[in-house]
Each structure stands twice: as structure tokens, then as C-alpha cells.
Amino acid sequence: MMLTIRKAQMDEMARVRIESFERRLTAHLREVLRERVAALDDIRLEEQVRRGVASGLRFFKTEKDLTRYCEIVLTILGGWQEQDHPEPALEILRPDSIEAGQRLANFERWVGKKGRRR
């Protein structure tokens, strides 16, 4: 007997996995970046993590890379605002031809130079 998994089932498994990651990431950020995210209450931090994961999935596939991306945006840029990253940042984050760790290092360097300006 062959097992068939429908698209709806695959989508549900992906959603559950992402929600689990978001919970773990929120706890990680609350603990590791305590002083930097202290101004965010639990609801606001959870919202920022959801936005960060959704944004980061455009560029990264691993939890490690998504975590680092969220750390950079939350600590240096102060989180996600109404608008997306400016085009120069997107040009750094997009190229799949550059290894994810290098794109993150380049992005961190770029946001460090820009500070909170977006």
C-alpha cells in the first residue's frame, strides 16, 4: 500500500513546524538578547518573531540562518517596521549564489553602517 500525502497535509505540517520554531525562537531571543529586547512585551516580541520568520523565509532555509537574521534585525534595526528592507539590503539578502552565512555577515555589516535608518 502506498501512502499519499495531500498538499493540504503538507501545508499543515509546514505550518506546525514553523509555529514550533517561532516559539523556540521567541524563548531564545528573550533569554539571549534579554537587555536588547526588554522593551518588547511578550505579545510584541511574538509579533516581531512571526514577521521576522515570514520575512526571513524569502532568503534563508535553516533555523540557524533565520535565527541570526532575526537577531540582526531586532538588535541593530530595532525590529520590523511597516516597510520592507530597502533595496540595497534586499540585494545583499537575495543572491542564492552566495552562501547564507556570508549574506548574513554582509547584511550585518550593512545594517551596522546604517544603524536604525532604513
Image (cartoon, helix red, strand yellow):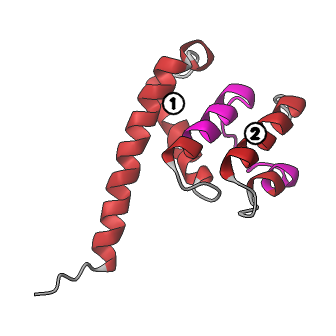
- In front: label 2 or label 1: 2
Tag 2 residue: 105
Dot 2: within a 10 Å radius of its alpha carbon, few (fewer than 14), some, or many (20 or more) residues? some
User: Would you place residue 49 above or below residue 32 in this image?
Assistant: below
Q: Amino acid at mark 2?
A: Ala
Counting from the top left corner in percent of width and height, residue 48 is at: 56, 37
**In front of the other: 35 or 104:** 104
In whole angstroms, how far apart are the C-alphas of marks 2 and 1? 24 Å
The residue depicted at 22 percent of the width and 83 percent of the height is 4
Q: Which quadrant is the N terminus positioned in? A: bottom left
- Label 2 close to label 1 by CB (< 8 Å): no
Counting from the top left corner in percent of width and height, residue 104 is at: 71, 43
Image-based side of 50 in relation to 99, left or right: left
Q: Which quadrant is the C terminus positioned in? A: top right
* SS for dot 1: helix
Q: Amino acid at mark 1?
A: Leu
Tag 1 residue: 45
User: Would you place residue 86 above or below residue 97 in this image?
Assistant: above
Identity of the residue furthest to the left in this view: 1
Which residues lie in the magenta part?
67-90
Counting from the top left corner in percent of width and height, residue 94 is at: 74, 59
Identity of the residue furthest to the top in this view: 35
